[in-house]
Image (spheres, rainbow, N blue to C red):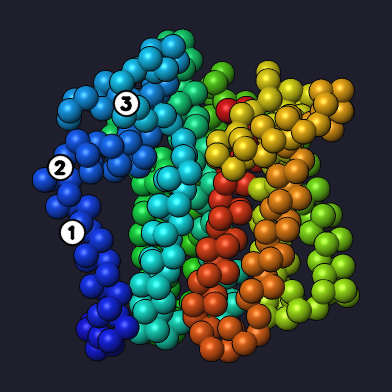
Amino acid sequence: MTFPETDRERAWTAVVGVAVLALVGGSLLFPDTVYGDFVWHYFWGPVVADANGAQCAVWNGGAVQHVYSSTACATATEPVAYPGYTLVSEVGYAVTLLVSLVGVTFLLDHLEVGEDLRLLYALFPFVLLGGALRVVEDANDAAAAAPGVEQFLNFPVNTLIISPVIYFVMFVITLAALVACVFLARRTTVVEDYYRPLAGAGTALLVATVGFLVYLSATTEYVSLLPQFTVLTLLFATVITAAVWYYVRRSLPDVASGTEFAGAVVLWAHAVDGVANVIGLDWAAELGLPRDLVPKHPVNAAVVDITQNVLPASVIQYTGDAWPFLLLKIAAALFVLWLFNAELREEAPRYFTLMLVAVVAVGLGPGSRDMLRATFGI
């Protein structure tokens, strides 16, 4: 099937092509500067270190050394890549996400789908699936750290569920499911629309993934089952969302004017992220884990550091130091919802829907991962 290309699509293709050519060409011409100091240092190196269970990975003119000692990492010659995110990588992922959403909007225009918010609800299970797959990777790391146990996913297969590679994997899975369900709805009489089979496909994959984690908790010692983390996270996130959304609808109607109930879904997604961080970082030990979790993102870590520097230890011992992150998530979600007004929804309904999906994913993706990795003790 071919589609006529518009001027906007040609411009988008040109911009993306130039960016890819600059990265590939620069990596070939200046491998140490462009690839080693930038691409590898901030993007691929953290994946390699994470996938091999190393404290860090060191780039040395094309040769990569996996280092398993934090002391050796601190004295290694740059570039040194650590598992997880940096501010540079998070900005890069954000830019890539925005550019990708424009391209997906063009595809949805051609398919003539995504013009209403039912697509958001249909894709909701896929957002949770991404977080659950990241917990499978956490379980894989836990297996490697357990004495006498081998990983069930080895390098390089395990890189498929490590950030940022998992973003592309989830994009392919979701896009394939969407196209298949659209075809099923339009070319057969099996279903009336594509929303229900799409949601069903995502739910089936999510149940299978969480079921695998439950299986590991029942058959291994490196994964446990602590359902109180999921129960408390969902309970507090729902109560907070209900209270805040009630206030918004009554006192700040402009914030909810463009999104209707979908706005509550966005708010809930970010409340889950905030609550999961508060519970995991401050109260995990009290709820059954050997120790509290550590922040996975620079923003989380920065909030914790600022709170520790501002509040005295005598206060933090009762309140914890992660609670400002919850307030930040709620405020950020409300600000974004205020931007998503009715006028934007009317002018660009498909882009409006996709952006809402992305905002939900930014909150619920890491939030569900933090919730589930605490739930399964990893």
State the separation of the CA atoms marked 1 and 3. 26 Å
User: Could you say which quadrant of the image residue 14 lies in?
Assistant: bottom left
Pointer 3: what residue?
78
Marks 1 and 3 in Cβ contact (< 8 Å): no
Badge 1 element: helix
Q: Residue 358 at what x, y percent from top left? A: 53, 63
Residue pushed farthest left? Answer: 29
Residue 208: % across, % down: 51, 47
Mark 1 is surrounded, within 10 Å at the Cα level, by few (under 14), some (14 to 19) or many (20 or more) other residues, namely few
Q: Is residue 157 left or right of residue 108?
A: left
Q: Position of residue 248 (x, y in %)?
A: 82, 70
- Residue under the image location 22 percent in, 39 percent down: 33
Name the residue beneath numbered marker 2: 30
Query: Of discs 2 and 1, which sits in the foreground?
Result: 2
The mark that comes first in sequence, 3 or 2, is 2
Q: Percent x, y for residue 56?
A: 38, 24
Identified by mark 1, the residue type is: Leu
Q: Amino acid at mark 2?
A: Phe
Among the 4 quarters of the image, the one containing residue 233? top right
Task: Classify the position of the C terminus by image quarter.
Answer: top right
Marks 2 and 1, the one that precedes in the sequence = 1
Can residue 2 be seen by looking at this rendering?
A: yes
Q: Residue furthest front?
A: 310
Q: Is residue 288 visible?
A: no
The residue tagged with tag 3: helix, strand or loop?
Answer: loop
Residue corresponding to mark 1 = 21
* Secondary structure found at label 2: loop
Q: Nearer the viewer, residue 248 or 178?
A: 248
Amino acid type at circle 3 is Glu
